[in-house]
Image: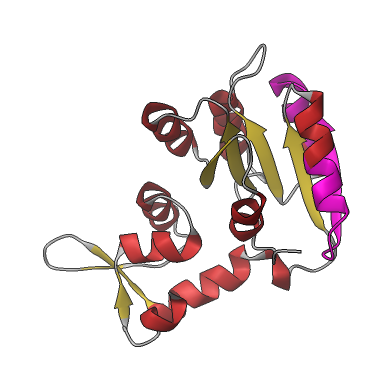
Amino acid sequence: MIDELKNKPYLTPIEVAQWMMVSPVTVRGWAQKGLLQAEVTPGGHRRFRYEEVARFARQWNPRGHKGPLRVLIVDDDRAVIGFLKELLEGGKHPVVVETASDGFEAGRKAHTFSPDIVLLDLMMPGIKGDEVCRQIKQKPGLTPVRVIAMSGYLSAENEAQLLAAGADACLSKPIDTARLYKVMGLERL
């Protein structure tokens, strides 16, 4: 797909979303926050220069990351935590994993561990995942943290809530590992 886009000087939010494997809402959020530079047409539509999206993709993609990728897994299901921890630590890419079993612990560890990516369950005791995501994205110093939400109950409404809270992507459980690697920017092992 990226090869098809190389011939286009400007990309639509939908094309950028397909490239980055996120929702168009997330792309608009990146533009509003100034993370991804956009130009606005006379009709009020955002368009993104191919070179700018490629720059952002390299920055967003941990393959260019200095040092090991730091991932915080937040889930109240110990089996899910164990699976994801083993999956990420056992790959060919250097990954440091920390875990939290509820939203309160996630907030504390987001500050002390300084993750690059948070894999966040939606349904947890105490604070729901969308509120944890919102708090992470609103804290100074944590706004660049990428949040990938996960749910066994992912509906269009839940996904919209998570994206509105600042999640960069949403995945259904059971986790499709190939999609997870792609969303995280890691090659399939």
The picture places residue 16, in percent across and down from the top left corner, at 39, 65
Residue 62 left/right relative to 158: right
Q: Give the residue displayed 61% in from the left and 60% down from the top.
A: 182
Give the tally of numbered discs.
Answer: 0
Q: Give the residue displayed 40% in from the left and 67% down from the top.
A: 37
Specify the quadrant that holds the C terminus.
Answer: bottom right
Question: Is residue 40 visible in the rendered structure shown here?
Answer: yes
Viewer-nearest residue: 84 or 138: 84
Question: Is residue 112 visible in the rendered structure shown here?
Answer: no
Q: Residue furthest top?
A: 126
Q: Give the residue displayed 68% in from the left and 40% down from the top.
A: 119
Q: Give the residue displayed 43% in from the left and 74% down from the top.
A: 1
Magenta span contains residue 81: no
**In the figure, residue 158 lies in which quadrant?**
top left
The picture places residue 43, in percent across and down from the top left corner, at 11, 63
The picture places residue 86, in percent across and down from the top left corner, at 86, 45
Magenta span contains residue 105: yes
Residue 122 left/right relative to 96: left
Placement of 137 over or under 35, stated as above or below? above
The picture places residue 174, in percent across and down from the top left corner, at 63, 36
**In the figure, residue 127 lies in which quadrant?**
top right
Viewer-nearest residue: 103 or 149: 149
Q: Residue furthest left?
A: 43
Q: Which region is colored magenta?
A: 84-109
